[in-house]
Amino acid sequence: MRVIVATLVASLAAGLFGFDTGSIGAITEMQAFVDDFGHLSPTLRGVVVAVILLPSAFVGMTAGNVADKLSRKYAIALGAVIFAIGSAISAGATSLGMLIGARCLAGIGEGLFLPVGGVYLAELSPKHLRPHMMLLYQVYNAGGVTMGFFVCYGSANIPNSMGWRFPFVLQTFSAVVLAVGCLFMPFSPRWLLTQGRREEAEAVLIRLVGPEHAAERRELLSVPAAQAAARTKSQLDAMREIWEPGVRGRTILGLVLNVFMQLSGIDFDPSTSSFIASGCTGIILTIGTVVGSFYIDKVGRRKIWIWGGICIALSQLVLGVFYATKVTEKSQAGKYAVIVFIELFALAFTMSWSLITKLYAAEIQPNRTRAAATSFGIGTNQLANFCVAVSGPAFLASSSYGPYFAYGSFSAVGAFFGWVFMYEVRGESLEKIDEIFEGSPIAISWPAFLRPTQQRLTVARRRRNSRHKAATLPSPGVIPDGVQLRELGNAAAVEG
């Protein structure tokens, strides 16, 4: 129950991101907004909508180091406070420049709480609950998008500037609730271990992991204190560590999956100019995410990514054919067919790549690099999101079908990439997943005549990773920063 409560609070981070995504486009089209700031050109409107993503991307790449130093929950709280200030200034903006600047400030906060929230839930949840808790995080995201559409639909009827300001006011209030709620959430037990606070980690685990899952508790606590404790790292050290042997392959895998997620074209959707289409898409995203919680741990991450990518690619490619042959101009049935495939694309995305990407990227990292690598991956995701959002209108203006063929092709490549490199980690603890990725980075079976070579490469890689780990561990008799003699004795007792 405590895990669920913590998840409900932390998931507000994803809800804030979704709400801003779902509301900002509609805000710029409200008559009250036009009365205050005039009609915006397509380029300027794109800047107002997407500008939040740039600071979010760059701050997100460094958020892991903040989370390692402050703790996961305090990093989320700090991001929520900054986001609340930016949203409050947006609500009171008197000029377009002031609004853009305020959205940049909100982006800084978003860059902190969005990636760290996912890391926090991955580390806090027992393995039998982890997929469901991470999916709840995504449900908040999709639900936030839907709520943004409907709140703007209602507030657009307010005859004065409060019509476009109200969504920002609601956003500010929600961010304050998140910041205050974080203060009452437990620390991540895995973060506590990295700080040498073993007794506190044990106390948190006792509250979060029931006696029926005592084996998982023992598995985590069996990590020697000298190995679990981490020194305070600079940002440069944190970035360097995610590219070290034994970790960089996982970092690259998470980055590539995050980029493919955006290259599917999920943030390129000309149908969103209609409220009805936008609202329906938001509802489909929410329903698809909820349904996903019932099969993600039964089917597995790898299969969902592969088959989801195939469905995404087919939907986009069919849409490209429709626009290339101008079926929408020939018949009403053609227009309906386009709408159907747009919604099928949204459903395929939300039931596969939207569910898997951030969860998988967080799961495959070891404790010491999870926050930094996951944050860097989500920052890259936001940067790709910005590129797609800004380039989409110009791309569509040059070709009515080109974007669909391009995004469909990217999605097909992404599905193939997942088939080659994604190991299945369904039902495994984070510590067991760490062991899985010590070997070959290729998830598929090599041809029979190459398997001896694969085995030799796997053995060599594991030896090299072991030597690297041994070189980075403290020398015998040296007590790492923050680790007490008593803790070293406890670790020895566990190992013995």
Image: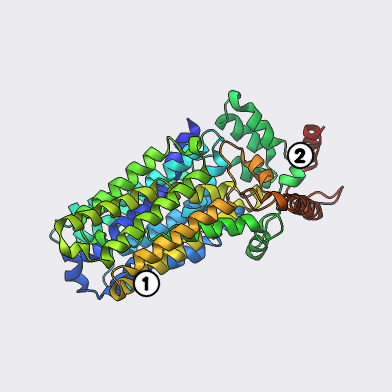
**Front of the two marks 1 and 2:** 1
Query: Where is residue 473 shown, x and y percent of the image?
Result: 79, 51
Label placed on residue 487: 2
The spot of residue 451 in percent (x, y) is 72, 50
Seen at 27% across and 73% down, the residue is 42
Where residue 105 appears, as percent x and y from the top left, is 41, 65
Q: Residue 292, located in which quarter of the rendered image?
A: top left
Secondary element at image label 2: helix
Q: Which residue is drawn at 47% across and 39% down?
A: 296
Quadrant assignment, res 250: bottom right
Q: Mark 1 points at which residue?
A: 391
Q: Nearer the viewer, residue 197 or 374?
A: 374
Q: Along the horizontal axis of the image, is 48 left or right of 336?
A: right
- Name the amino acid type tagged 1: Ser
Disc nearer the start of the sequence (1/2): 1
Is 213 located above or below residue 408 in the figure? above
Q: Distance between the residues labelled 1 and 2?
A: 54 Å
